[in-house]
Amino acid sequence: MNNTKTESMKRHVQQLCQQFAQSETDPLSQAFAPDVMAQILREEVGVYRERIYPPMVTLRLFIDQVLSTSHACQDAVGQRLCQRVADGQTPCSPSSGPYCKARQRLSLKLPQRLCKHLGAQLEPCMAGQWGWKGRSVKLFDATTVSMPDTPANQGVWPQSRSQQPGLGFPVARIGALISLASGAVIDYAVAAMKGKSSAEQTLLRELAGNLCKGDILLADALHSTWWALNMLTEQGVDVVMPNDGRRKVDMSEGQILSPCDHVVWWPKPKRASWLSKDDYAQMPKGMWVREVIVNNQIFVTTLTDSCQISPKELAALYARRWNIEVDFRTIKATIDMDVLRCMSPDMVRKEIAVYLLAYNLVRWAMARAAQLAQVSPRELSFASAHRLIYSFAAHLQRQTCDKTDILVAALLNSIARCKLPVRPGRIEPRAKKRRPKPLPLLTVPRNVARAQIRTQRLKVVP
């Protein structure tokens, strides 16, 4: 890579960092350390032509696009046109075609690696201060997103069986490991909603390598199986989950710690079809698992020391698993990833990666603001931070170092002041008050409906 390209890339990386309140004067500003960023770009970008939309420019515009309110490609093109004119360069075409082609050339691994790098870098900074009893706690769950109804998307992520052909939309399942301390995505995996390797348990097995010895994992009852607990305990990871309703619990068995707390032996079940005979033979014959009952709910955990951790503490810890539900709502509603817009599977994967990268960048800025204000990152409003970052972005990208530090300080101070209200016991009905327009549902494919309308119009023509 020649010097011109290197300097250009450094400038665009700096603009991206400045946009999300990263400056060289802060210890948490090393999310994109120059040497690490240079290595990632060398490995994932490689040789390229210095065009109007080089890789870092394309990625930065893609991030701005997913964080904007309209998500339109034309907005990204207009932003690039404005930048070039302001820099004294020749104006680029207002057509969105070149930008869309640049997005297609962009390597999928670049936003994926940057997203995971941010999550991995942020976790040790936050877990030490805001972890649980000095330990890192990670949350796992899965959610779904839909996308345009194209044959290519349907081939990879088929629509629900309950939907008629031509009337549904492809659906993808996204499993994610999210930090309890910071809310950042540690890693994620994407699968179809049906077929082999599409279940949530498979996604957890795929992401389990991102868990470290000493971590605590919170997940729902679907994962409280012998297989999951054995896999995680072999990695030195503890779990807290509700008991699967199909498993009967007898509190009079095992080592009784209290009337509602005991440690019981879970024998190894019969070999599952997805497991080889050799792997099955190498697994232990069983494991000791603690089961506790708090407020009529049964929890399963590998934290067996009742002297250090009481049943109420376990229940309080598991109650914080709800944060991942809020995080998914933030990703799907606040930054609007619920319905994707790309027409091909490759671009859908890139769109998901860029959305989660943008989410982690906002989380990083929130972590910096929380550290400066000495509050937990979970106490700050993501929606407010997102709006403030988007409002400051244009000015942060173009200012000199002195003015950038002033703007960054103002941005972080503003984010730190946007605290979430404490609302214990809050209840909201899952219902809409505003009525939708009384339009009938589409019951045939759109091209058939158009043909029917044309036929009806021909009949009324005199």
Image: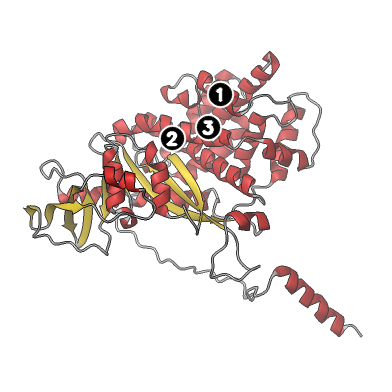
**Residue on which disc 3 sits:** 20
Residue type indicated by callout 2: Gly
Task: Work out whether residue 142 or residue 287 is closer to the camera in this orientation and state it.
Answer: 287
Residue plotted at (41% across, 50% down): 202
Point out the image quarter for the C terminus: bottom right
Does the residue at mark 2 contact the one at mark 1 (Cβ under 8 Å)?
Answer: no
Where is residue 320 drawn, in percent x and y?
31, 49
Looking at the rendering, which quadrant does residue 37 occupy? top right
In the image, farthest residue toward the top: 3
Residue type indicated by callout 3: Phe
Give the Cα distance between marks 1 and 3: 11 Å
**Residue on which disc 1 sits:** 404
Where is residue 137 drawn, in percent x and y?
31, 40
Which of marks 3 and 2 precedes in the sequence? 3
Is residue 76 placed above or below 297 in the rendered structure? Answer: above
Is residue 298 placed above or below 190 in the rendered structure? Answer: below
Give the Cα distance between marks 2 and 3: 15 Å
The answer to whether residue 14 is seen in the rendering is: no
Residue plotted at (55% across, 18% down): 402
Where is residue 452 drawn, in percent x and y?
77, 77
**Residue on which disc 2 sits:** 119
Residue type indicated by callout 1: Thr
Looking at the rendering, which quadrant does residue 260 occupy? bottom left
Compared across the picture, whether 104 is left or right of 194 comes to: right
Task: Name the secondary structure under disc 2.
Answer: helix
Which of marks 3 and 1 precedes in the sequence? 3
Task: Name the secondary structure under disc 3.
Answer: loop
Circle nearer the viewer, 1 or 3: 3
Task: Work out whether residue 211 or residue 457 is closer to the camera in this orientation and state it.
Answer: 211
Task: Work out whether residue 263 or residue 241 is closer to the camera in this orientation and state it.
Answer: 263
Task: Name the secondary structure under disc 1.
Answer: helix
